[in-house]
Image (tube, rainbow, N blue to C red):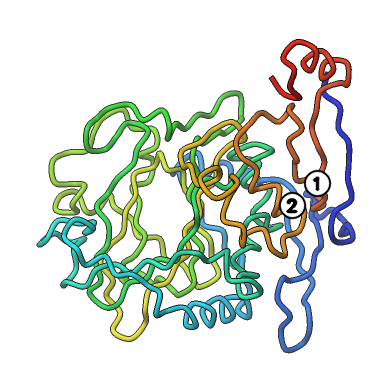
Amino acid sequence: SLTRFARSFAIPRPPTFAIAGKNFVSTMSAVNGANGSAERSYPIEMTEDERYLFDLNGYVVIRGVLTPEEVEEANAVIDNHSQDMIERSDGQLRNAVKGSPLYGSGPGRKDLGQVLEWGEESKVFKSILAHPRLVPLFHGILGTGYHMDHLPFVLAQDKGGEGFQLHGGTVDCKSGECNPHLAYTCHHGMIRSALLGCNVMLTDHNPGDGGFCIVPGSHKSNFKMPEGMIDGTRFQEYIIQPATKAGDVVLFSEGTVHGALAWTPESRQRRACLYRFAPATNVYGRSYFGHEGGGWPKAIYDDLNDAQRSVLEPPYANRLDRPNIESDGSVTITTRNERKKQHDREVFGTKYF
């Protein structure tokens, strides 16, 4: 049997309360505004509405995850590092077919990495790892013990900036081959996505602006896309650009076909920070073990609380001493009984089999 051992969280446990049969947790905003820290309340489990919409469409928009103050701070930090943006101008880095609706008028998309490695400036970006508004959804879609799978980065588009050809699908939208590493399932009411995209919107994406787009329901498709659809030249009415405001978060299964439209606003740069998360035992990326001494880049670990740090664990099963985030923000270790662990040491000569 599994036993659970609690260890104290870095901050006091927030109170929980109920409204209309739903449990909520109360916590403080991550960034101090002009009037000090504002208390906000969040559901402690994925709601039935969210489950339905995610299962129906393969994505869900969570409104107002970041406060206006947090959005302002994140954008100020991006401004401080804007000289490090790298435009995808090389032909081999272009993401869309020239002349297609996704290509735009010429400028390439700009990418800005290392968003978790800027010390104090990374505070808002690190908050997403275990944000109290998002953790219930991460648990509902990925299960407990979820982990960061890719290094997050900022996507930026100026006017006419290139979007991204449609891609993904549990059945690859281009080849028609099965994509088990992007699998989506729902059995007996339990949703699981092998890889989850988390798009944190840092500027408004109004109808017709462009940016992130998706084909709702395509996570359940059994066939490749019709000719021309991945380039946006056919069946455009099925390609949806969700209207979002700065601070909203779009959670989408990577098994749902998605991409980006060319950006149209004259004076507003598109900005979004893209994260990917996976269940405890699933993996796509490899940065979590590819740096000096193993693990993610060292600067990422600075100033993390226990919950955020748990999300940086490499993939392995929950029962092998994996830290799990609880509904109140505390962290517990899920483990096996001591006799079984002793047996493994005797048999294999190591702590874990």
Q: Residue at x 88, y 57 (%)?
A: 13
Q: Dividing the picture into quarters, in which one does residue 161 lie?
A: bottom left
Is the Cβ of the residue at disc 1 closer than 8 Å to that at disc 2?
Answer: yes
With respect to residue 68, does 175 lie above or below?
above
Q: Report the side of 16 relative to 229 (left or right).
A: right
Is 10 or 257 nearer to us in this picture?
A: 10
Q: Residue at x 85, y 17 (%)?
A: 342
Which residue is denoted by mark 1 in the rendering?
Answer: 331
Q: Dividing the picture into quarters, in which one does residue 316 lie?
A: top right
- Image quarter hosting the N terminus: top right
Which residue is denoted by mark 2 in the rendering?
Answer: 307
- Dot 1 amino acid type: Val
The percent coordinates of residue 2 (x first, y second) are: 82, 23
With respect to residue 77, does 128 lie above or below?
above
* Helix, strand or loop for disc 1: strand
Q: Dividing the picture into quarters, in which one does residue 102 lie?
A: bottom left
> Callout 1: few (<14), some (14-19), or many (20+) C-alpha neighbours within 10 Å?
many
- Dot 2 amino acid type: Ala
The percent coordinates of residue 193 (x first, y second) are: 51, 36
The percent coordinates of residue 49 (x first, y second) are: 60, 47
Q: Residue at x 39, y 66 (%)?
A: 155
Going from N to C along the chain, the mark reached first, 1 or 2, is 2
* Helix, strand or loop for disc 2: helix
Furthest-bottom residue in view?
34
